[in-house]
């Protein structure tokens, strides 16, 4: 039994593949840091600038597969915005939609009483 084109689901034609041969690796800068006896690291000013580290000096750190990752709040926010960019609509406001839904909800509640 053959399905029509609209019900093929995952059987649809594959999209074009990514050409890794033309991809450029991001430029990485590295520094040799010393760990003090108390476990402290001093992050060089150039690294702090690249990390978008603010004057408060607060970062989030985690270890994944034995590698210490450190990210500033500003860099994390920039990263999140880049991830979400494809889903952003210039013509549709989620805030306006939310406000509209709340107004309808309030009107329904008011009509009940």
Image (cartoon, grey):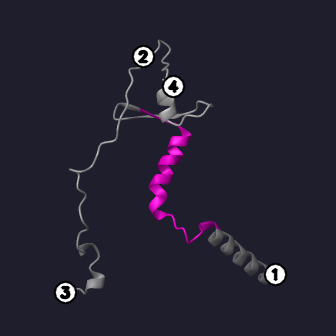
Query: In the picture provided, is 108 more to the left or to the right than 37?
Result: right
Find out whether residue 73 is within the magenta segment.
yes
Q: Which residue is mark 4?
A: 45
Magenta: main secondary structure equals helix
Compute the Cα span from label 1 to label 2.
69 Å
Q: Which residues are magenta?
A: 69-95
**First-in-chain label (2 vs 3):** 3
Of 54 and 101, nearer the camera is 54
Q: Which residue is mark 3?
A: 2
**For discs 3 and 1, the disc positioned in front in the rendered view:** 3
Q: Which residue is mark 1?
A: 113
The reply to whether discs 3 and 1 touch (Cβ–Cβ < 8 Å) is no
Query: In the picture provided, is 16 more to the left or to the right than 101?
Result: left
Residue 77 position, x and y percent, is 53, 47
Placement of the N terminus among the 4 image quadrants: bottom left
Residue 5 position, x and y percent, is 26, 84
Position of 67 relative to 87 (above/below): above
Compute the Cα span from label 4 to label 3.
64 Å
Element at badge 3?
A: loop
Compute the Cα span from label 3 to label 1.
55 Å
Residue 105 position, x and y percent, is 70, 76
Residue 34: mark in rendering? 2
**For discs 2 and 3, the disc positioned in front in the rendered view:** 2
Compute the Cα span from label 2 to label 3.
65 Å
**First-in-chain label (4 vs 3):** 3
As drawn, the residue found furthest toward the right would be: 113
**For discs 4 and 3, the disc positioned in front in the rendered view:** 4
Q: Residues within 10 Å of mark 1 (few under 14, many from 20)?
A: few
């Amino acid at each position: 039994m053959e399905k029509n084109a609209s019900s093929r689901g995952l059987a649809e034609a594959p999209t074009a593949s990514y050409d890794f041969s033309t991809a450029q690796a991001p430029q990485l800068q590295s520094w040799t840091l010393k760990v003090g006896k108390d476990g402290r690291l001093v992050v060089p000013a150039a690294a702090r600038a690249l990390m978008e580290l603010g004057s408060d000096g607060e970062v989030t750190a985690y270890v994944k597969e034995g590698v210490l990752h450190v990210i500033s709040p500003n860099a994390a926010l920039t990263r999140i915005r880049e991830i979400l960019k494809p889903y952003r609509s210039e013509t549709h406001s989620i805030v306006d939609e939310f406000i509209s839904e709340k107004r309808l909800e309030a009107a329904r509640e008011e009509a009940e009483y």
